[in-house]
């Protein structure tokens, strides 16, 4: 079938619009999938030649998406406007077009939304100040906080993504964001998924197979795991804790840099040794009892404390990486990628070989 130029333009325009509704910056696999689906549904559109029939469409679609983003950038769409001002003919001194691209990489459906209709930065800033004052009260109005956090979501994302402020600055400007309910709510706003229930349902589903993988480990890792498995019991929290502490060992991460334990008297010293992680604080009088506190540390400071148990703290610190647009900590990078891609089903399906191997083993009956 021979297409006119206008007809091909219209097809590509519709495809670009549909792709953008899912991703502003699709990757090569996305272009391949869309082009193959187009040819599969409309075989007459396949292009002749030695290359696969979808190949030309794939290349055309890449160019069309670039043009479509330019059009949206001019219209003021924040998720593409943020990457404007790069090096070009009219801006030769700008930053490289491939450098420091701000775009969703972990399945963020609402990465950088526009401000709501009939709202501006001044009105949303006033709402933010109301939130700050509400958080100073002993008894918080949970409904008010939830509504105003929803209302100010776009302002918060623009601050965090565009300006990349220090975590402590975010704590001061958005204190409500560092409460359990709002960590989960923010994750839902960004990724359109309920983090707490999805995290623990998936963790519990995979626990039996993960424990089998842990038990099969030998060598130096095997010794670490045997010490870990000594804490295994029928208690749900204990089992979850063992699995979450064992996963980094399976993936070759370094959990000792991320999961820390200390006595109450050594708390300040322990915090000074941690840049990012979960700190469990034990009583010196009876270390075997429940921890005195479980805290989350980011950029060397406590941002959340007195979390009810270790698995909840891991779930929350994962949620905070989305809420604060933080890179995964290198010491548990593989583990967090596994949580994101396998446990929560977010982002790209392609996994590094080590993670794909573990995923395949988990799916075995």
Image: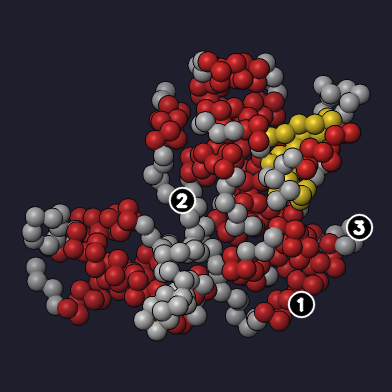
Task: State whether residue 37 appears in this view.
Answer: no
Q: CA distance from mark 2 to mark 3?
A: 39 Å
Q: Alpha-carbon distance for marks 3 and 1? A: 21 Å
Q: Which residue carries the number 2 mark?
A: 347
Q: Is residue 209 above or below residue 307?
A: above
Query: For mark 1, what is the residue?
Result: 126
Q: Position of residue 154 (x, y in %)?
A: 62, 70
Badge 3 local density, few (<14 within 10 Å), some, or many (20+)? few
Q: Is residue 70 above or below residue 315?
A: below
Q: Are marks 2 and 3 in contact (CB under 8 Å)?
A: no
The picture quadrant where one finds residue 65 is: bottom left
- The spot of residue 320 in percent (x, y) is 65, 51
In this view, the mark in front (2 or 3): 2
Name the quadrant of the N terminus: bottom left
**Residue situated in front as seen by the camera: 117 or 75:** 75
Residue drawn 87% across the image and 28% down it = 283
Q: Callout 2: helix, strand or loop?
A: loop
Please identify the quarter of the rendering in which residue 208 is found. Answer: top right
* Residue 133, visible in the rendered structure: yes
Earlier along the polypeptide chain: callout 2 or callout 3? 3
Looking at the rendering, in which quadrant would you find the C terminus? top left
Tell me what residue is drawn at x 62 percent, y 33 percent.
255
SS assignment at label 3: loop
Pointer 1 local density, CA inside 10 Å: few below 14, some 14–19, many at least 20:
few
The residue tagged 3 is 138
Label whose residue precedes the other's in the sequence (3 or 1): 1
Element assignment for label 1: helix
Task: Tell me what residue is drawn at x 65 percent, y 42 percent.
Answer: 315
Q: Earlier in the sequence, mark 2 or mark 1?
A: 1
Q: Position of residue 12 (x, y in %)?
A: 27, 71
Q: Is residue 298 above or below residue 124?
A: above
In the rendered image of this protein, does residue 167 appear above or below residue 309?
below
């Amino acid at each position: 079938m021979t297409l006119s130029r206008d007809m091909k333009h219209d097809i590509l325009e519709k495809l670009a619009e549909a792709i953008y509704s899912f991703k502003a910056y699709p990757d090569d696999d996305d272009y391949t999938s869309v082009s193959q689906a187009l040819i599969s549904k409309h075989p007459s559109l396949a292009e002749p030649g030695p290359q696969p029939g979808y190949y030309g469409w794939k290349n055309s679609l890449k160019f069309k998406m670039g043009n479509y983003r330019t059009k949206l950038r001019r219209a003021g769409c924040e998720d593409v406007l943020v990457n404007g001002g790069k090096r070009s003919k009219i801006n030769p001194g700008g930053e490289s077009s491939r450098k420091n691209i701000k775009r969703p990489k972990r399945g963020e459906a609402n990465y950088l939304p526009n401000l709501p209709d009939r709202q501006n930065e001044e009105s949303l800033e006033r709402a933010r100040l109301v939130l700050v004052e509400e958080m100073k009260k002993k008894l918080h109005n949970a409904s008010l906080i939830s509504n105003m956090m929803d209302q100010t979501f776009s302002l918060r994302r623009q601050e965090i993504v565009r300006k990349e402020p220090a975590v402590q600055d975010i704590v001061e400007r958005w204190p409500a964001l560092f409460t359990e309910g709002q960590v989960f709510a923010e994750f839902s706003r960004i990724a359109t998924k309920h983090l707490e229930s999805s995290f623990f349902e998936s963790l519990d589903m995979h626990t039996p197979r993960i424990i089998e993988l842990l038990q099969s480990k030998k060598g130096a890792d095997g010794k670490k795991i045997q010490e870990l498995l000594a804490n295994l019991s029928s208690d749900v929290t204990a089992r979850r804790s063992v699995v979450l502490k064992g996963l980094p060992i399976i993936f070759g991460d370094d959990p000792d840099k991320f999961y820390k334990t200390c006595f109450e008297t050594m708390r300040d010293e322990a915090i000074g040794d941690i840049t990012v992680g979960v700190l469990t604080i034990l009583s010196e009088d009876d270390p075997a009892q429940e921890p005195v506190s479980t805290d989350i540390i980011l950029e060397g400071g406590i941002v959340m404390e007195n979390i009810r148990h270790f698995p909840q703290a891991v779930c929350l610190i994962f949620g905070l990486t989305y809420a604060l647009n933080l890179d995964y900590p290198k010491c548990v990078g593989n583990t967090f990628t596994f949580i994101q891609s396998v446990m929560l089903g977010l982002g790209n399906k392609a996994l590094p070989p080590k993670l794909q191997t573990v995923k395949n083993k988990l799916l075995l009956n």
